[in-house]
Image (spheres, rainbow, N blue to C red):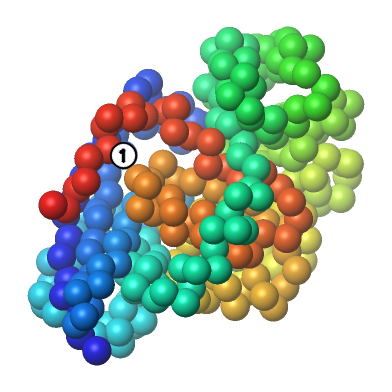
Amino acid sequence: MHYKFEFRSYQRRFRQPLQTSHGVWEIREGIIIRLTDETGHIGWGEIAPLTWFGSETIESALDFCRQLPNAIKSETIFSIPDNLPCCQFGFESAWEALDDHLKSQIPNLKSQIAYSGLLPAGKAALDRWQVLWQQGTYTFKWKIGVAPIQEEMNIFDRLIEALPTETKLRLDANAGLNWQEANKWLGVCDIANIEFLEQPLPIDRFDAMLDLSKRYSTPLALDESVATIKQLQTCYQLGWRSIFVIKPCIVGSPKLLRQFCQQHDIDAVFSSVFETTIGRQAALNLAAELSRHNRAVGFGVNHWFNEDDERNPVS
Ligand code: MG
């Protein structure tokens, strides 16, 4: 079987720049791909790299697309090298979208998913949660490691005070803490009954995070440390049994991700990388299929873009 292959790049500006401990992010760039099979069916896919997580750059993804012929075979799709994980995801999910059998199983599962709403860093979180809560969000995520720790802890106290008891709060440090700060945060997280703390330390401090995960009752989640399937496997083999954040759009092959999740009963939180609807649907399908521990997925991010900003990128 041959597939007609087309692609187009896109840029979307955040309504307000996204602040994390990696810096400020203003424009999301990615590539939409379209496969058409010999019967005229169309499958869409998205390549949405997150370079500071170790994904390929948008330029190398574009180079890969440019060197492909206008008609490709499945073998091409399943032999994309591991240094292009976002391309692996984009092409395989477009290929899967052509498969009616897979498509029909998903809708039921998807209606049961709960979403976690991403709050802005700093004081702005104090105003924002109510809007999301009124729209039905019960799990919130707040970024820390952006401002000095004492300042953030003061805001944290006010946020905890304000949040209704039925809500959950998770914190994400994006590898921005040191050992002492991580211990400080985990101390207050234990008291405040925080759902989990995500990636307190940089990825080269795996042993320290494993140690921390045994010292406190608040679970730890790895995110930056497990950006690709290979990293997921490594951290699992090294003994990580707390939470894994999986960002399907950057993790690599959906097929290999399924295999990994079916072999190991991991506690996974599926999460967005600010992709468009195309990548989002493919990622949510995987989340619905592979989630086992009832964690809200980190896809509550639509409020970070203007809704009319998303045009059909390939016409
Ligand atoms: Mg994270």
Count of marks, rendered view: 1
Give 179 or 57, whichever is nearer the viewer. 57
Give 64 or 286, whichever is nearer the viewer. 286
Few, some or many residues within 10 Å of mark 1 (<14, 14–19, 20+): some
Residue visible at 52% across and 22% down?
120
Instruction: Give above or below for 213 relative to 137.
Output: below
Residue 66 drawn at (x, y percent): 12, 66
Could you say whether the residue bearing mark 1 is in a helix, strand or loop?
strand
Image quadrant occupied by the N terminus: bottom left
Residue 186 drawn at (x, y percent): 80, 33
Q: Left or right of 11: which side holds 160?
A: right
Q: Left or right of 4: which side holds 22?
A: right
Q: Is mark 1 within 8 Å of ligand 1?
A: no
Residue visible at 57% across and 42% down?
298
Instruction: Give above or below for 137 relative to 294.
Output: above
Q: Left or right of 282: which side holds 311?
A: left
User: Quadrant of residue 77 in the image?
Assistant: bottom left
Residue 97 drawn at (x, y percent): 37, 68
Residue 276 drawn at (x, y percent): 35, 45
User: Quadrant of residue 40 in the image?
Assistant: bottom left
Residue visible at 52% across and 76% down?
256
Circle 1 residue: 28
Give 311 or 30, whichever is nearer the viewer. 311
Q: Left or right of 274: which side holds 64?
A: left
Q: Is residue 256 visible?
A: yes
Residue visible at 58% across and 24% down?
135
Give 178 or 71, whichever is nearer the viewer. 71
User: Quadrant of residue 190 in the image?
Assistant: top right
Amino acid type, mark 1: Arg
Q: Is residue 189 visible?
A: no
